[in-house]
């Protein structure tokens, strides 16, 4: 997919990757970190299609974020380092989705308690090891591409 040629959300939808859609049931707010790499085909498209309107999208790539904005109207877009933005937030979201690049997945997993602190109901974390998250309390792990998984961490209420 040539990202610069994407003009319609249906183009992103056509390229989406496996995602545990059921985790979005009943969610009213979401934060998507590291979301601009493929204009949200791994995560944001599912949040959009679930009808969640209170959404924070965070990524460090200003060009890709600019391409995303017209595709996801009404969302709040923050351009910056996900870890820095995360530290500055003063609110929680029903679901937090963190989908770092594969070379950053280990760091994201080390920061598990910090990510969990932002989520009222569910943390969905991109990981490169399907077994370690289960040992850390994930309720399920779903393979999405070769070498990467989604780990679902329900939060106690």
Image (cartoon, rainbow, N blue to C red):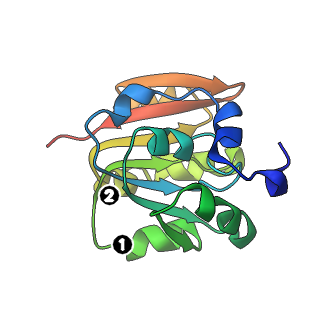
Can the viewer see residue 18 in this picture?
Answer: yes
Quarter of the image with the N terminus is: top right
Q: Residue 76, percent across and down?
A: 46, 68
**Residue sitting nearer the eye, 89 or 45:** 45
Which residue carries the number 2 mark?
118
The residue located at (67%, 51%) in the rendering is: 39
The image's mark for residue 31 is: none
Which residue carries the number 1 mark?
89
**Residue sitting nearer the eye, 145 or 15:** 15
The residue located at (46%, 47%) in the rendering is: 97
Q: Residue 29, percent across and down?
A: 32, 53
**Residue sitting nearer the eye, 31 or 8:** 8
| Mark 2 vs mark 1, CA separation in Å | 8 Å
**How many marks on residues?**
2
The residue located at (68%, 69%) in the rendering is: 66
Above or below for 44 versus 79: above
Residue 65, by quadrant, is: bottom right
- Label 2 crowding class (10 Å Cα cut-off): few <14, some 14-19, many 20+? many
Q: Residue 51, percent across and down?
A: 38, 43
Quarter of the image with the C terminus is: top left
Mark 2 near mark 1, Cβ–Cβ under 8 Å?
Answer: yes
Mark before the other along the chain sequence, 2 or 1: 1
């Amino acid at each position: 997919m040539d990202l610069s040629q994407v003009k319609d959300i249906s183009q992103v939808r056509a390229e989406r990757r496996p995602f545990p859609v059921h985790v979005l049931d009943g969610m009213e707010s979401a934060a998507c970190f590291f979301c601009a790499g493929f204009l949200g085909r791994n995560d944001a498209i599912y949040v959009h299609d679930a009808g969640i309107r209170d959404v924070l999208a965070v990524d460090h790539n200003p060009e890709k974020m600019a391409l995303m904005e017209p595709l996801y109207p009404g969302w709040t877009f923050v351009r910056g380092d996900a870890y820095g933005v995360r530290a500055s937030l003063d609110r929680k979201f029903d679901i937090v989705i963190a989908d770092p690049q594969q070379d950053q997945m280990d760091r994201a997993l080390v920061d598990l308690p910090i990510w969990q602190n932002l989520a009222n109901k569910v943390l969905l974390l991109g990981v490169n090891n399907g077994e370690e998250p289960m040992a850390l309390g994930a309720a399920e792990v779903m393979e999405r591409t070769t070498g990467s998984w989604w780990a679902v961490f329900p939060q106690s209420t």
